[in-house]
Amino acid sequence: MAVTAGVQGAFDTLATCLTEAHDLRIVALAAVICTIGMHSAYAIGGVVARSPRGRDQLLWGAAGTLATASAIWATHFIAMLAYRPGVPVAFALDATVGSFFLAVALVGLGSLIAIGRPGPGGRTLGGIVSGLAISAMHYTGMAGYDVPGTLHWKPSWVTASVISGVFFTVASGHAAWSRHRLVRRSAGTLLMLGVCAAHFLGMAAVTVTPDPFRQIRPGALSSETLLVLVTNAALLVLALALVAVFVSVRFERRRRAEERRLRDFADVAVEGLLICDGDRIVGLNRSLEQMLGRSRDSVLGRSLAEILPGIAAAADVPVGRERDATVTDADGTSIPVRIVAQDIALGDSAHRVVAIRDQRERLSAEAEIRRLAHLDPLTGLPNRRSFGEALAARLGPGARLVGRVALVMLDLDRFKPINDTLGHAMGDALLRRVAGRLSAALREGDLLARLGGDEFAVLASVADAAEAEALADRLIEIARRPYVIDGHVLEIGASAGIALAPADGRTPDALAQSADIALYAAKEAGRGTWRLFETEMTMRRQQRRDLELDLRRAVARRELQVHYQPQVDAATGAFTGAEALVRWHHAERGTVPPSVFVPLAEEIGLIGEIGTFVLRRACEDAAQWPGTLTVAVNLSPLQLKEPGLVETVLAILGETGLAPSRLELEITETALLHDDGSTIATLAALRARGIQISMDDFGTGYSSLSHLSRFPFDKIKIDRSFIQLAPHHANSASIVRAITTLGRRLGMAVTAEGVETEAQRAFMLGEGASQLQGYLISRPVPADAVAELFRAHSRVETG
Amino acid sequence: MMLYRLVYRSRANLPEASAEAEVADLVARARAANVRIGITGALLHVDGQFLQAIEGPLEAVEALFEKICSDLRHRDVQLLELAPAEERLFGAWAMEQVGRHEDVVDRLPLSVGTAATSDATLALLRAQLPRLQRPG
């Protein structure tokens, strides 16, 4: 209560002081001058801040100080003229003029402190000094206040006056630097309040007691003289204010134009741009507005960290070197960006421009590239690379094997002919269908990939081998079903090899190799089926590889030999020629039978080379034989398909000098299977040159009488299996009889192969075979032996 | 648009207990879809096998057959015939399930070359169509 009463009393005192001791009209004038002065003080302050450092700034600073000090001084003395203590008053010249210069000095010092030490500390200290300037001026002025009486001071009011002056000035200084426009605008008013509060509280502190014995000192300024001085000071304030406003408007206009030009430039930029003054955002372009989904006004004034989380200050953005960051848009979504900064001079101070490049498009393009790198574009399945990664993830170091991992390698059977004959577009369409079907045969969690060409693979978790086998069964069965594409019906099959980790391989490479070996075994077993990897397969594969290597070496070194099995006329027993048979004697393996190495040579593409070698050697040898003895050479189906066979044969005949009529080429029925006419044409071309063409091994394999009707063979050779059974086995005898009859009717000679006994010879003779070949006549013998045999016989005949 | 007809047979890969219900459900679903894509035909499910004739535009026939061939409820799908057709043999049926077991079990065509089997299959399917609804 006491406090309230005290405050109430203070207000009453102040009110009484203002209303009863002052002429309120003049007080109002003082307030107007003060208001103009304080606002112009800040207007000039703004000009100072924008002026380049140096003389201009110093001059404007001086003008501002002068305006402020003048306004404080003028306000004080106008207010003093309004003060009517009820006695005549005068003003001592020294104190009156001195108080003006004191105000100038202290205001100047305060401003220097505030400008010299940017930041809240400097502003506070400068504010205190400037606030003290008000009180110092006031009480110095009051020291020259001359009345016929005594001045009594109340210390508490004096203290309040000083403190309020300082308080409002400090507050004004801080307000001038505020982010908020309204607060900034209030700086002048706050300063005005400081001046008024200091003055009127100071006036309320004083009581004049008339003293008839005191005289006003001579030389003191009268109120009238003071009025002239004060009016001049007020005019100075007004003039400075006008100049300040004028200059500041020009500054503002230039700043606006510069800002607009900059913004136009910035808005053209594709990248987002932020302009920072310290850490405060003072500008941004349209691209950034769009990126953030926020309006310019909602971003301006925020701190950089609000837009770029993780970037604490503008100084953290590297100049000239990009770094990754994220910005947060209006919805709170984080957008990946790259940022780079550049310092630019904007107006008169350095600003930092932060360029922000949206990375979403680039990142999604990169993700797309990564996706494409991992997917087979034709089928959309994972490709070899991503399958390898998945396999590595399941088997790699650190991966925990739960149960077993099955790797199923799958190759399509008869895919290549479809691709070759119906075109790649059809092949591609078929592969897409296959991919769809195989996918349908998977279980949850199985991974299907296309490794390339017609190779697929499945990675699956299985409890046991049976589960993997069931999977392979499903895959093969579903792939084997017919395909209808663009009205074509396509039939293909699939073979699969299964390997189980960890038993068949602990590393991706080892497991894949095992599955490949199993797949190879499935193909060897006739395709259309699966094989589970077995350790022996590796051994067999290795053996086959070794054999393959040895065969290649033997062919390259021409280590194959040609032996000859003589043939005789069935009726006379005279030699008619011999069949050339290829032999391979290996230093360690011993003699490798043709039934082993010929299929291998066909598979690895060596058969052409071997065939040509045998043909050349046979022609060379036969050229040394007497008379018209013929040599028979086997042609493999693959050789018949090779272009240029006719030219090769003719060239060899030319080189060796063997007459074409002495060469007999033997083909099997297999060569005519699936013939599109080209094999028949080749045979016809050879026969046209006088070379004889025989049908070998007749009666086995794909025997079809239609083969005999398609080409006029010179000779049919009955397979040894019939001869060996013939005399006693009724069915075989009938077949032999049928063939010899057929040959006779068609005008084809008939040769019996594999004649080993006298009984067989007699039987064949009886059935009308024209030629015999077999152990009974001679085993196959080396070239020089057969040549010797033929020469000896020829001597006997001619001698 | 050229009309095609496709005939196939396959083994049913369905648990015996629920096979009948599942096939009936399958046919019901197929019917609605078939109307949209212009497919007509008939399906016989008996003795653990399917015999089906499908007719319609080539594209639709191909797509449907591919769906069948991607379905593990069939096994050993054997295509008996795919040929252009002059007219629909099952014009009124978006997919009719025909044939009671005892009616047809002894008359199932044996595999005697695909063309002959196809003809026999078509004849059997036609004969089993509901008599009252047969057009003409």
Image (cartoon, helix red, strand yellow):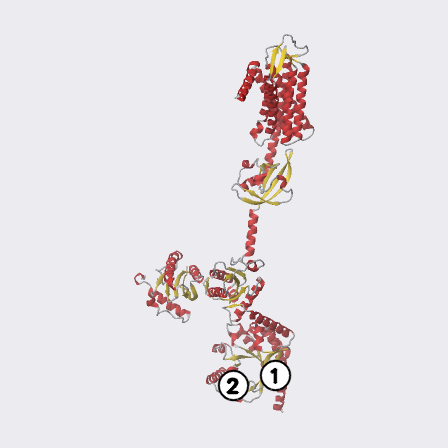
Q: Quadrant of the C terminus of chain A?
A: bottom right
Q: On the image, which quarter does residue A34 sit in? A: top right
**Residue A785: % across, % down:** 63, 85
Query: For mark 2, what is the residue?
Result: A769
Q: Which of A123 and A716 lies nearest the eye of the viewer?
A: A123
Figure check: A129 above or below A793: above
Furthest residue in direction right, as rendered:
A55
Figure check: B132 above or below A231: below
**Residue A84: % across, % down:** 59, 12
**Residue A261: % across, % down:** 60, 35
Q: Which of A116 and A569 lies nearest the eye of the viewer?
A: A116
**Chain that bears disc 1:** A
Q: On the image, which quarter does residue A383 sit in? A: bottom right
Image position of A704 (left or right of A136): left
Does residue B87 appear anywhere in the picture? no
Query: For mark 1, what is the residue?
Result: A781
Q: Which mark is residue B131?
A: none
